[in-house]
Amino acid sequence: AAGWVTGWAEACVTAWTDGTILRPYASAATSDGAKDSTVLNIVAPAGEVLSNVVIRDLGIEHPYSLPATPATIGTGDGIRFDASASGSQIAQSRVENVAIRLMGRDGIHIRGDAGYGGLDQTTFARLDIVANRRHGVYGKYATDITFSDVLSSGSQRCGMYFEACLNMVFLHCLFNGNGAAFVNDGSATWTGTTFGDWPYYDQAQMYFNGCQRLTLTALDFEEWSGETVASVWTPAAVQTALAFYNCRGGSITGCTTFNADYQHGAIESWLIAFL
């Protein structure tokens, strides 16, 4: 079926040993930060199935460092799979050997059609997703998705955030130091300063909302709660390593945590939260 790819990428800006670095076009960001500077936007038309999309051996990045603003890095995603049109779907696709850094919104953004499955039968393998202004990965309405050997580190919100997804497998993924946009407002609820306030249970390295049949194997969560420096406990923004809200079915096997101290009191930390 017909489909299209849009974006603001400057092709072949810098050659990598194994591929190419794509950067959002310099004029993609405006003074009010309203410009959508998504680099690769894969779109399935209404009523169509776009299949066999392969993205590999790429770097996608901004030449800035956090904290960046929409005026400098825009408000777009590194890779966006858009199957939100009625009856559309993107299927049997693969993203591998890709590094995504410093996007104005999400490193990878998946949006689907509620009644048709959105992104389906797709694998993400050997990815570095670092320092994005919202989530490392965001997905809604995706089915039969696999993430393997993925580093999700230093994004301002969650390392990965999924809503209404089905049959997902995660293998050998590392989550480290995400969530800097979440701050302690002095009460039992933590707030985010950039994208609106969220309940504190959303503030996890990995968060699932209304998902079913999840398999999590050999995942590592680091720097998700805080650390003790000179006998003083200093809270990290993210207070939960792994959170499930209204989810059904799945398994968690062989996961580890590292560099996280628990906080007790008005604001608590959890390794896993079932909500």
Image (spheres, rainbow, N blue to C red):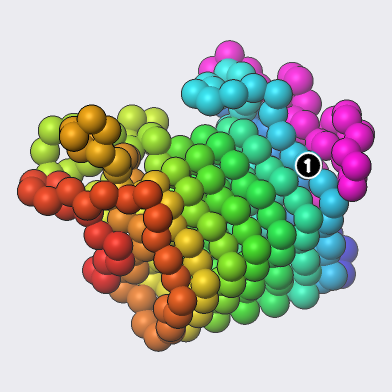
Say which of 169 and 270 sits in front: 270
- Asked if 186 appears above or below 175 in the picture, the reply is above
Q: Is residue 35 magenta?
A: no
Q: Is residue 13 magenta?
A: yes
What is the residue that sits farthest to the left in this orientation? 265
Specify start and end residues of the magenta stretch as a single range. Answer: 5-32
Residue plotted at (74% across, 19% down): 27
Residue plotted at (43% across, 84% down): 250
Q: Is residue 164 visible?
A: no
Residue plotted at (78% across, 69% down): 93
- Asked if 90 appears above or below 126 in the picture, the reply is below
Say which of 21 and 174 sits in front: 174
Q: Which quadrant holds residue 120?
A: bottom right
Callout 1: SS: strand
x, y (%) of residue 165? 50, 72
Residue at mark 1? 59
Say which of 177 and 76 sits in front: 177
